[in-house]
Amino acid sequence: MQIILGIPGGIAAYKSADLARLLTNQGHRVRCILTEAGARFITPLTLSSLTGEPCYGANPDQGEWRANPSIEHIELARWADIMAVVPATADLIGKAANGLASDLLSTVLLATRAPVLWAPAMNTGMWSHPAVQANLSRLRSFGHAVVDPDDGLLACGEEGSGKLAQVDAIAEAILMHGAAKLRSLNGKRVLITAGPTREDLDPVRTLTNRSTGAMGIELARAFRDAGAQVQLVLGGDLPAPWGVETARVRSAQEMLAACQARWSGADGLVGAAAVADQRPETFAPEKVKKGEGPENLVLVRTPDILATLSAARRPGQWILGFAAESENHLAHAAAKLQKKQLDGVLVNDVQGGRAFGDQTNTLTPVTAQGPQAPIGPLSKDALARAVVQWWNFQIEGRGTVQ
Ligand code: C5P
């Protein structure tokens, strides 16, 4: 695995040398990026000697230990399978939570698409300050992982929470999160439904909803980028994403048939489509003429795609659903999880028309363990990547997916 270890200025920085050595000895490639303050606590020579890889610095003019000045921050950002910041300082956490990019480390953190893990270490007062906790919540909402500090005697002489977690535990967390991309989804076949369905009354009229399919399409891209073979069953008019086998459908019945044809070959299913719950009882082959006075439209239920596929699943297949609710959304999601026998439900709060067609969105995952930390608000592409990372972590943690 290719690991970038970011080391800002904290007294626990010396422990990063141990971490770098441990990971290198396990056969991983570790490249360190020091901030200017980090370089006051530990030297680049120590790190490059331990890892056998270049150590990068805060500024281009610190050339003596910026081994390859031609490597840009973007190349480093792409190189990483995972980035870990150890010890994570209040300052860097605050910067990253607010998207600041004022030196090499904060810039690479902003540019990377790899999972990011933070192992904070700081004085107890700083650790418990609401500003630091709010910044960490924001990082979690981006899909970043946090290895909480331990309790103990701190370098400042105070006793309490804020001591860097054990190096072994941090190494394990890095490998688990970094491996998610390389292991769980590589070659896995993921079936995704997206977009609205259209239930035709006659050749010109149709019943549909306000979904565009944007979220499901971004999820298809994010699963594809994480190594999965994605099959997309897509309603609506948006263009299909590159590199994703796409079946276009119109009605709920067509969507079900397309999914049934693909489900047995899939490892998992993400039901992101906004499937119409009702369709007209009959389809009139000729345009229906307007009548005099009130007119009635008889509707019948469409098949529930997730529930049908869930009932036909083989062991190891996982299913994620969505819920768009305007009130009491977590309770409804928990009921849906149970009723359709899903592994997770991602809840949209659609009060006041939010979510459909919006550029940014927030999703709250609900699993058998209950509601989890909300992911977002993020643009739909970043949200999709964060959801894939979250789900990877669940898969890794449970270890139930073959
Ligand atoms: O029951 P409800 O429509 O609220 O559930 C939403 C979830 O179920 C979404 O994941 C949606 O894609 C899926 N669904 C389905 N077939 C239906 C209705 C919803 O697969 N007929």
Image (cartoon, grey):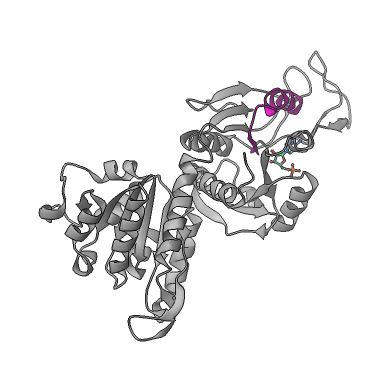
Considering the image in quadrants, where does the N terminus appear?
A: top left
Residue 265 part of the magenta segment: yes
Percent x, y for residue 118?
A: 41, 61
Q: Is residue 4 left or right of residue 391?
A: left
Above or below, 52 against 200 in this view is: below
At x 11%, y 52%, the residue is 63
In the displayed structure, would residue 212 be above or below residue 178?
A: above
Name the residue located 59 percent from the left edge and 27 percent from the top edge: 231
Left or right: residue 335 compared with residue 19: right
Q: Residue at x 72, y 52 (%)?
A: 333
Quadrant containing ligand 1: top right
Whole-percent x, y for residue 130 in the image: 46, 74
**Looking at this view, is 28 or 251 the one in front?**
28
Which residue is at the front of the view, 177 or 230?
177
Residue 105, compared with residue 252, is above or below; it is below
- Tell which residue pokes out farthest to the front in this image: 25
Is residue 287 something that shows in the picture? yes
Q: Residue 13's spot in the image, x, y percent?
A: 29, 67
What are the residue bounds of the magenta stretch? 252-272
Q: Is residue 206 magenta?
A: no
Q: Quadrant of the C terminus?
A: top right
Q: Is residue 312 left or right of residue 53?
A: right
Q: Nearer the viewer, residue 138 or 231?
A: 231
